[in-house]
Image: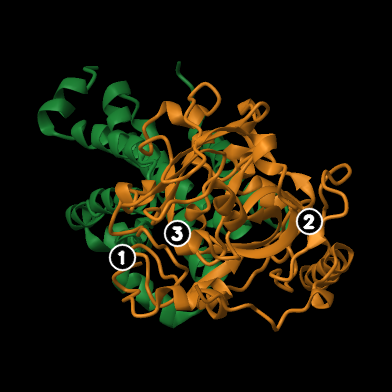
Amino acid sequence: MLIKRPNAIRPSEITPESVYRERRRFLKLGAAGAIGALALPAQAGLFGGSDEGPPGKPDFPGLKQSRFSVDEPATSWESVTTYNNFYEFGTGKEDPAENAHTLVTDPWSVAVAGEVEKPGNYAFEDLLKPHTLEERVYRMRCVEGWSMVIPWVGFPLADLIRRLGPTSRAQYVEFTTLHDPQQMPGQRRAVLDWPYVEALRIDEAMHPLTLMAVGLYGRELPNQNGAPLRLVVPWKYGFKSIKSIVRIRLTEKQPQNTWNEMAPHEYGFYANVNPAVSHPRWSQARERRIGEFLKRDTLPFNGYAEQVAHLYRGMDLKRFY
Amino acid sequence: MANRKDPIPWIKAVVFPAALLPTLYFWFAALTGNLGANPIEALIRGHGDWALRFLLLTLAITPLRRLSQWGGIMRFRRMLGLFAFFYATVHLLGYLMLDQFFAWGAIMEDIVERPFITVGMAAFALLVPLAITSTRKMQRRLGGRRWLRLHRLVYPAAALAVLHFYLMVKADTREPLIYALLLAILLLMRLPPVARAITRKP
């Protein structure tokens, strides 16, 4: 499989945390001047974001910086951890931050099943141990028309799949979120068909951009962001990046993903970010980057076209949305 | 109680500023950075919620008069209706000016292609003539019967407003369905047999 590397980005070009923080502060000061003394944002005013950093000390000291990171100012810790779609904890954006404390992430285990040589139940720590964690700053584009830039901590899914030994019949990888209404109060109502399921084609799963994340901003994942283990597929709409994974199954047939099952005309299996294909209820041409006032143009494959467009060569993206 | 002084202006003097509290809260919180990570969305949705609430409150006046036999309550109807229009206007302007920032091409595309926006615009369009003809002068100029007939537009407007909300949500339809249920009750109470049954005899 030919994988195009984004050789335009060298490690030296990646912005260190202290610098992008400073830049945010500078941008905000400009915005504050524009609307006068009212703009002293505790979080995010109408015209700019907050620069409040994550609490405490980093959980992953000495993280390797990934050359796959984008050079764009990261969305504030506050926004990344309080504005979430995680229906298992409620359908409001602020519900997960409020309710996710009931999730127990330790102990945690992941069932590996299907077309693999080494199926079984893996303790989270054992699953993680062989991997070197790195920081990757990725764009995240929600199907609802907003976006963020998030410094994830994780490792390539490809490394994990290789270690599990996929059989020749493995064509897709299916992921399942924890189903436990005791811990996840949102599951007490049938808003979606629980448990939440997502899936990738095997070549998408093996792509070097596809990340298994265990942290953000150098901290362990907050529960509302999908602790302790989640998927991050930066060229697809956010709902593909399934949270709090308890099961990974390799399959021969294309699995049914939850939102596609719920509303097939609105959410596809691929869900690649595509400004040319509108959602039936809103345009996907532009997006609001959280913390910014003006919308920006949405990029094909969320700006990762150079790396991933070849995966879909010859496919009608209007049909396979 | 035989009160020679009319209490209604005093009640209105309380209701009026109270009805402004939501918008004051949203703007103050938005400008000071206390309206969450996406303040534009929160501001627009907040005003939409209150437009719907004031619309239902306006529609509750007539059934409440029948239930209570207190005619004075009718004197709050115009104020509540105009507050519904006010919140709907800020809701719409927020979409045009803050969310879309005058991107007329995108706005036209939304109106034509997104059913929830088409329906929302239609609801607002129906409210405009009602707000314009809300003054006593316009009421006189139109004549009572024509004015009443025109103001029946509030029923389709409310139905479209609820539908607008219902079509907007992705999966959790509970909240718009609650509004739909309340609206259905308020409309049922206007059916002549029901209206007769609930009217308290003096």
Q: Which sits in the foreground, B81 or A201?
A: A201
Location of residue A28 (image quadrant): bottom right
User: Hue of chain A?
Assistant: orange
Residue at x 71% of width, y 62% of height:
A136
> Is residue A266 placed above or below A87 in the rendered structure?
below
Looking at the rendering, which quadrant does residue A3 occupy? bottom right
Mark 1 nearby-residue class (10 Å; few <14, some 14–19, many ≥20): some
Whole-percent x and y of residue A261?
30, 48
The colour with which the image depicts chain B is: green
Q: Which residue is mark 2?
A: A41
Mark 2 vs mark 1, CA separation in Å? 34 Å
* In-front residue for pair A195/A1: A1
Measuring 36% from the left and 76% from the top, which residue is drawn there?
B109
Does residue A18 appear left or right of residue B116 in this picture?
right
Q: Which residue is mark 3?
A: A202
Is residue B35 visible in the rendered image? The answer is no
Across and down, in percent, residue A69 comes to: 71, 69
**SS for dot 3:** helix
- Looking at numbered disc 3 in the image, what kind of residue is underneath it? Ile
Say which residue appears at 42% left-offset and 82% top-offset. Answer: B105
In the image, is residue A263 above or below residue A48?
above
> In percent of the image, x 88 and y 54: which residue is there?
A62
Q: Is residue A112 left or right of residue A40?
A: left
Residue A280: image quadrant is: bottom left
Q: Is residue B63 visible?
A: yes
Residue A150 placement, left or right of B67: right
- The residue that disc 1 covers is B118
Q: Amino acid at mark 2?
A: Pro
| Protein chain holding label 3 | A
